[in-house]
């Protein structure tokens, strides 16, 4: 009788351990997914604000159908905590690096959670092209 009780206790400890482990894994996966979606949402907001800057006449503080003289013009226009020396916007859910190349504005967002590769943070790249006002997003981690 004692052996059966010990066996049941050991078996229940194993089942509880598996349940706790899978619960933690599910929580971590949800955290990563939530951070990634938050980064993408912020980047879409930035892209829409950048397009607004692009289309606003220079007399009203916009780019006048241009991205402006440098990325700092767009960063300041967005109104977030923009850091001119590093061309970044820092928020609670991540850091966003802005760069311009021709008619394209590239925003590289790095999240606060470790991504799916298990070693580096969530990372998403958004390219806003002013020639056709398109937005493309690439999830890299």
Image (tube, helix red, strand yellow):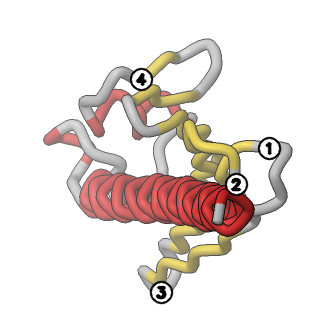
Q: Residues within 10 Å of mark 1 (few under 14, many from 20)?
A: some
Residue at the far left: name it: 60
Which residue is disc 4 drawn over?
Answer: 82
SS for dot 1: loop
- In which quadrant of the rendered image does the N terminus lie? bottom right
Q: Residues within 10 Å of mark 3 (few under 14, many from 20)?
A: few
Name the spot of residue 78 as percent of width and height, x first.
Answer: 29, 39
Which of the labelled discs sits on residue 120, or is there none? 1
* Most foreground residue, 35 or 87: 35
Residue at the far top: name it: 85
SS for dot 4: strand
Q: Is residue 82 above or below residue 24?
A: above
Q: Residues within 10 Å of mark 4 (few under 14, many from 20)?
A: many
Q: Earlier in the sequence, mark 4 or mark 2?
A: 4
Q: Do callouts 2 and 1 mark residues in contact (Cβ within 8 Å)? A: yes
Which of the labelled discs sits on residue 130, or is there none? none
Q: Earlier in the sequence, mark 2 or mark 1?
A: 2
Which residue is disc 3 drawn over?
Answer: 132
Q: Quadrant of residue 103?
A: bottom right
Horizontal side of residue 33 vs 14, given as left or right:
left
């Amino acid at each position: 009788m004692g052996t059966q009780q010990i066996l049941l206790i050991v078996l229940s400890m194993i089942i509880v351990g598996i349940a706790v482990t899978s619960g933690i894994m599910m929580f971590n996966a949800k955290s990563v997914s939530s951070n990634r979606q938050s980064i993408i949402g912020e980047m879409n907001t930035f892209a829409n604000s950048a397009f607004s800057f692009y289309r606003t006449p220079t007399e009203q503080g916009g780019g006048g159908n241009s991205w402006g003289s440098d990325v700092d013009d767009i960063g300041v226009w967005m109104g977030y905590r923009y850091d001119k020396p590093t061309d970044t916007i820092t928020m609670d859910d991540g850091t966003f690096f802005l760069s311009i190349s021709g008619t394209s504005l590239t925003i590289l967002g790095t999240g606060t959670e470790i991504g799916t590769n298990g070693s580096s943070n969530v990372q998403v790249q958004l390219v806003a092209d002013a020639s056709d006002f398109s937005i493309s997003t690439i999830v890299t981690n």
